[in-house]
Image: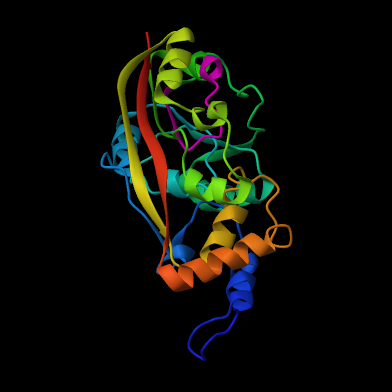
Amino acid sequence: MNSATPSTPSFEELVAEGEAVPTEGWDFSWFEGRATEERPSWGYARAMGERLGAAEAALDIQTGGGEVLASARQLPRPTVATEGWPPNVAKATALLHPRGAVVVASPEDAPLPFADAAFDLVVSRHPVTAHWTEIARVLAPGGTYFAQHVGPSSVYELVEYFLGPQPEANRGARHPDRERAGAEAAGLEIVDLRAERLRMEFHDIGAVVHFLRKVVWMVPGFTVDQYRTRLLDLHERIVAEGPFVAHSSRHLIEARRT
């Protein structure tokens, strides 16, 4: 069942492509024509840029390769970004230093290495975890946390294809109501909280492989060798039936330190 016409890449060719693409940073341009994802209606990068233009001192938590922060037209001085993965630290540094932003290598679960009340704006796009007490600590009174978070059961059609049904505790993690409770417990006031589920399509198995290598928490420890049989089955399904459809979950959260 692994036949291919001269114009159609084989399973092995597609998988090899997905394995070969570098995974550092949050540039998803490689997926163009191979996978799609609807964007949230609120336009996070644009709204973030507007807030950065009015800020005096800003922090971007878990900046990845710095791509989202670098999209802002204006950055306050100082602007600082944290990142825990060394390849991303290097990429973010190269991208953000010319803009006057400082990149600090800091593990995701470590306390933020900044003084109390150091920033009037803290932003983050898709943090692994929101450490609310630390966010509240580094915010100045009246300061704002403005972020887009991954919501519950995001892309779980793909997760459960490989891992099987997940416990309800896993599916309900990152729920906006839990985010609200965590933020409020840390002393923050919720100003805005909106959630959306968004259609995703994977058009070939190479896109699936690259996605699972890049977004490592979806199928922890993913390797092609370990999941080759499931990948081949999914490849044949996509060829026969069309794109594999999943749904991402996102929420916008704006919170103020009182």
Where 30 sits versus 183, above or below? below
- Where's residue 59, x and y in %? 48, 30
Rendered image quadrant of residue 232: bottom right
Using the image as rendered, state which of residue 97 and residue 52 is in the foreground: 52
Q: Nearer the viewer, residue 233 or 244?
A: 233
Residue 67 x %, y %: 46, 50
Q: Residue furthest bottom?
A: 6
- Image point 46% across, 64% down: which residue? 31
Q: How is the image coloured?
A: rainbow
* Residue at x 61% of width, y 78% of height: 13
Task: Point out residue 214 in the picture as x, y percentages from the top left corner.
Answer: 58, 53
Q: Is residue 4 located in the magenta-colored stretch of the structure?
A: no
246 is higher (above) or lower (below) than 181: below
Total marks drawn? 0
The structure residue drawn at horizontal position 35% and vertical position 34%, both measured from the top left corner, is: 52
Towards the viewer: 64 or 142: 64
Magenta run includes residue 129: yes
Q: Quick check: can you spot residue 24? A: no
Quadrant placement of the N terminus: bottom right
Place residue 226 in its image quadrant: bottom right
In the image: residue 221, left or right of residue 199: right
In the figure, 196 relative to 247: above or below?
above
Instruction: Tell me what residue is drawn at x 54 percent, y 68 percent.
Output: 235
Bounds of the magenta span? 120-134
Q: Is any atom of residue 189 visible in this view?
A: yes
**Outermost residue, right side:** 225
Horizontal and vertical percent for residue 42? Answer: 27, 39
Q: Residue 186, relative to residue 146: is it above or below?
A: above
Image quadrant occupied by the C terminus: top left
- 74 sits left or right of 133 in the view: left
